[in-house]
Amino acid sequence: MSGLSDSFQRPVDYLRISVTDRCNMRCVYCMPPEGVPILPRIDILTYEEIRDVVEAAAELGISKVRLSGGEPLLRSGIVDLVRSLAAIRGIDDLSSTTNGMLLYDLAADLKSAGLKRVNVSLDSLREDRFRSITRCGDLNLVLRGIEVAKTVGLTPVKINVVAMRGVNDDEIEDFALKTVRDGWHVRFIELMPFAIGHTKADEFIGVPEIRKRIEVLGPLEPAKIIKGNGPAKYFRLPGASGTVGFISPVTEHFCFGCNRLRLTADGKLRPCLLSDSEIDLRPALRSGDRAQVRRVIREAVACKPRQHELVKGRIPRRAMRQIGG
Ligand code: SAM
Ligand code: SF4
């Protein structure tokens, strides 16, 4: 295994897979209230096809895989998919990003099947607000899911918070305090503009401002990166066993360290989350020729842009739920 690297010499060892574009929530920044047309089933990669992609990717040096969506835990048979991917030689970190609604039921089985850890998206600690942001989420169910995930060892559980001015920014301090009181690992993510979903420019809050507001609680000391593959920078408040992380795709892009490739639910390799170019992997996959699959993966890695296109004012056309976030 020689390892993959792109044309800017960035090693690429991480594949994020959208296993479905369906979701049991309708978060305001991700979907319109009525939902969006879902992809026809025939277009969605089967589990066998996803396993073939991951096997080919592992042969090229991919060692970390994250299952996302849509809501990955909503796809039936997800535990079987996890089991089959966890068994692939070379995949040493298999994780998932979830809205947490089905974690309470599935965490133990996912852990036994070989999932290592989960990130849970949670934008409010207040029941009524959580429901209005997600339109159909149940905060208590998600909180119980987080606890079960910790108990069964899907750790570290990281909590992803998209901070939005006038929507949930008055909870920034509450989330930060959870790192002290309950040992949570909380990561604040800047709101990104997508063509689908309503992302209002005036709701955007940059990481520098979020950080300043947390520093009122105490100085933030740099913390060792907790297990992960991503662009977050981690800190600790005094006395906290948990960490505060910041992800700033807009105010301080981290493209220079980008190590990832994305696979959409309908089988397109996407070299960059925030740039629209994609390469269709399905013809190679459906030809049954593994060498072809590897060739297309290499091609997608070679196409990774130096940096994303938000900087040029271009907003991605595809929704996060199709790309996998
Ligand atoms: N349904 C799962 C969930 O919500 O965790 C996985 C898919 S979701 C698309 C992945 C992540 O993308 C979530 O943490 C969500 O908050 C984030 N996300 C979606 N739209 C976003 C946007 N416009 N800006 C920033 N983050 C966004
Ligand atoms: Fe669903 Fe995740 Fe999008 Fe929310 S952010 S609507 S949970 S895919």
Image (cartoon, grey):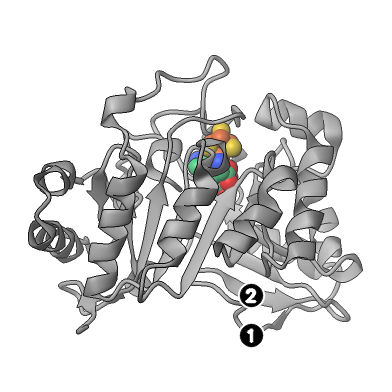
Q: Position of residue 321 (x, y in %)?
A: 45, 37
Which numbered disc flags the more N-terminal residue, 2 or 1?
1
Residue at 75% of width from left, 46% of height from top?
104
- Mark 1 Cα within 10 Å, few/some/many (few <14, many 20+)? few
Label tally: 2
**Amino acid type for the residue under numbered disc 2:** Tyr
Q: Please name whichever residue, 85 or 147, is drawn nearer the observer in this view of the structure.
A: 85
1 lies left or right of 196: left
Can you say which quadrant of the picture contains the N terminus? bottom left
Disc 1 target residue: 224
Q: CA distance from mark 2 to mark 1?
A: 7 Å
Residue 34 is situated, as x and y percent measured from the top left of the image, at: 54, 14
Can residue 160 be seen here? The reply is: no
The structure residue drawn at horizontal position 33% and vertical position 55%, both measured from the top left corner, is 51
The residue pinned by badge 2 equals: 234
Task: Give neighbour class at mark 2: few <14, some 14-19, many 20+ (Cα, 10 Å).
Answer: many
The residue depicted at 81 percent of the width and 47 percent of the height is 143
* As drawn, 126 above or below 247: above
Q: Nearer the viewer, residue 87 or 315?
A: 87
Dot 2 and dot 1 residues touching (CB under 8 Å): yes
